[in-house]
Image: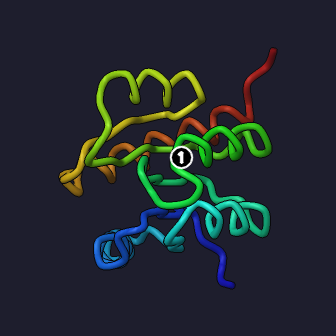
Amino acid sequence: MKPFSVLLVDDEEEFVKALAERLELRSITCAVALNGEEALRMVEDMPPAVMVLDLRMPGIGGMEVLRLVKRAHPDVQVIMLTGHGGQKDEETARRLGASEYLQKPVDIRVLMNAIQQARESRIAGGWKIL
C-alpha cells in the first residue's frame, strides 16, 4: 500500500472514487475505504493525516468510526461529510473530535480548504506545549 495523507470513507463507491480522483488532481494523495470496518483496518495499518468520513454507512457507521479512531489515534483529523445529518449529528461529531462537518454535495474548494486546515491543525498539534 502506498503512503497516503487522506483516507476517504464512504459506502457510495462511485462518489468516493470520483472524489479521490478530483483530490489527486489537486496533489492530495488519497486512499478509499467503502465501509467503516475497512476504514478502521486501514487506520490501524497506516494512520492518515486526515480522514473524510461519511456519517451513514451499513455496518459500523461514521459516528462509531469517529469515536474509535479518535480514541486510538487522536492526532488523525476527521472531517465528516454527509448528505443525511442534521444539527444534532454535527454537535455529536464535534464533541467526539471531528474537526469539520460538511454537507453533500460539497464544493471541492470548500473540502480542499477543510483538508488543508485539518493538516495544518495536525502539524500545529504536534508542537503544542502543555
**Residue occupying the point 66% across, 75% down:** 3
Q: Amino acid at mark 1?
A: Arg
Q: Which residue is mark 1?
A: 119
Residue 93 spot, x, y in % from top left: 49, 31
> As drawn, which residue projects farthest toward the front?
59
Q: Is residue 42 above or below residue 59?
A: below
Residue with the most extreme top position: 130
* Residue 127 vs residue 22, the one in the foreground: 22
Name the quadrant of the N terminus: bottom right
The C terminus, quarter of image = top right
> Element at badge 1?
helix
Q: Which quadrant would residue 96 be assigned to in this image?
A: top right
Crowd class of label 1 (few under 14; some 14 to 19; many from 20; radius 10 Å): some
Question: Does 7 appear above or below 61?
Answer: below
Q: Residue at x 59, y 54 (%)?
A: 60
Quadrant in the picture for residue 68: top right
Provide residue 2's location: percent of width, then percent of height: 65, 83
Q: Nearer the viewer, residue 125 or 14?
A: 14
Q: What residue is at 49 percent from the left and 34 percent from the top?
A: 99
Where is residue 69 shown, x and y percent of the image?
Answer: 69, 46
Residue 81 higher or lower than 41, as above or below: above
Number of residue marks = 1
- Left or right, 72 with respect to 123, comes to right
Percent position of residue 111, x then y: 31, 50
Q: Is residue 9 left or right of residue 130?
A: left
